[in-house]
Amino acid sequence: LLVDRFHSRQGKARPWILFSAPLLVASMILLFTIPTGNSFATALWIFISYNLFYSVAYTAYNTCHTLMVPLSTKDMQERGRLSVLTNSQGMLSGMIVAVMFPTFIVPAMGIVRGRWIAVMTFIALTAFPFILMEYYFTRERVTEHAHEEGSRSLRRQLCLCLKSRRWKTFMIYLILIHLTSCLSQSATFYYCNWVLGSYNDGYTQALFFAVGNAALGPGVFLCRPVCKKLGRENAMAGGFLLAAAGTAVCLLNPHSLIQVLIGQIIKSIGLIPSTYMVTAMLGDALDDVENHTGTRCDGFSSSVYNVIYTLATGAALC
């Protein structure tokens, strides 16, 4: 609601990225500087810092970050290029974390409190200038001349969105892809440490991520030509079938590192279209809502996007 009702020369989403930058840094540091010795003070600190980060700072940032590709342009080709570019950067950082943390950083930090605080403070401070770069080097061209209906209730916006078949299909797709992805991510640490390898051996989890997801690297260059030839929806549907085949290869012998890595490579090839085109598809869905109703529901749709991811994460952990 805040995003949809906010109007400025800088847009309705970008200002919230600027607002979230210092809050993200402060709350991230607070999460790792929890006082000890008093159980009530510890619990209160955790409650405040956790909610300051996830409920306020990260929600403000991620809701608007999700919208930056859809709001940058209505040109489907430009939107496709932007989606590949932004999601490839996310994949790169995710791979670095997935390989670096279990292999080098976590063994070096161990259970030494001061080392954890130093590392996470460094990461938080490093993120700050990049968040500012996103704010200063983006522009909301789509909403600059759009007819805004920010006063509509959430219920009314939901009714408007449900009139778009593309919007409904996209949200169903998000539920399925996020739930399966979160289930996989939640199980990976246990699986690599207790089934595929031995506890904290320093290489099994790194190999699982590095080799298993290696195809996503060249996928940056393959994604747009494939999606252009087959269409985004057809490319994703075919990719899901290939990903299912890769998962089946892993399940045939889940204790064999070689076979599991082969299955993971096949799976990652299948997930190339969905990995890099998700924000472009969100933009297509938002445009379809506007075409059917004459109203944009950007903030609402971005919130639904992030609610789906949050609930899928919780469901996977349970």
Image: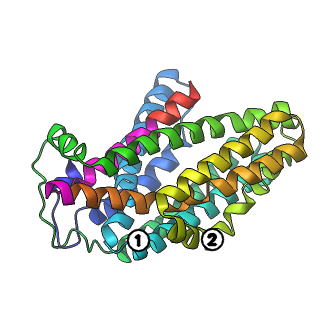
Which one is nearer the viewer's eye here, 124 or 227? 227
142 in the magenta segment: no
The part of the chain drawn in magenta is 291-310
Residue 212: image x %, image y %? 76, 53
Which one is nearer the viewer's eye here, 259 or 26? 259
Q: Which mark is residue 222?
A: 2
What is the three-letter code of the residue carrying label 2?
Leu
Q: Residues within 10 Å of mark 2 (few under 14, many from 20)?
A: some
Q: Name the element at disc 1.
A: helix
Image height check: is 317 above or below 8? above
The answer, for residue 260, to whether it is visible in the render is yes
Instruction: Give the residue number, with chain letter if any, for mark 1.
Output: 79
Q: Residues within 10 Å of mark 1 (few under 14, many from 20)?
A: many
Q: Residue at x 40, y 71 (%)?
A: 79
307 in the magenta segment: yes
Q: Quadrant of the C terminus?
A: top right
Q: Is residue 289 left or right of residue 35?
A: left
Magenta span: predominant SS is: helix
Q: Residue at x 47, y 22 (%)?
A: 40
Do residues under tags 2 and 1 come within 8 Å of each other at their CB atoms? no
Q: In which quarter of the view is residue 225 placed?
A: bottom right
Residue 70: image x %, image y %? 35, 64
Image height check: is 71 above or below 298? below
Q: Tell me how the rendering is colored.
A: rainbow
Q: Residue at x 11, y 55 (%)?
A: 149
Residue 267: image x %, image y %? 70, 50
Q: Is residue 233 left or right of residue 68?
A: right
Image height check: is 268 above or below 158? below
Which tag is nearer the camera, tag 2 or tag 1? 2
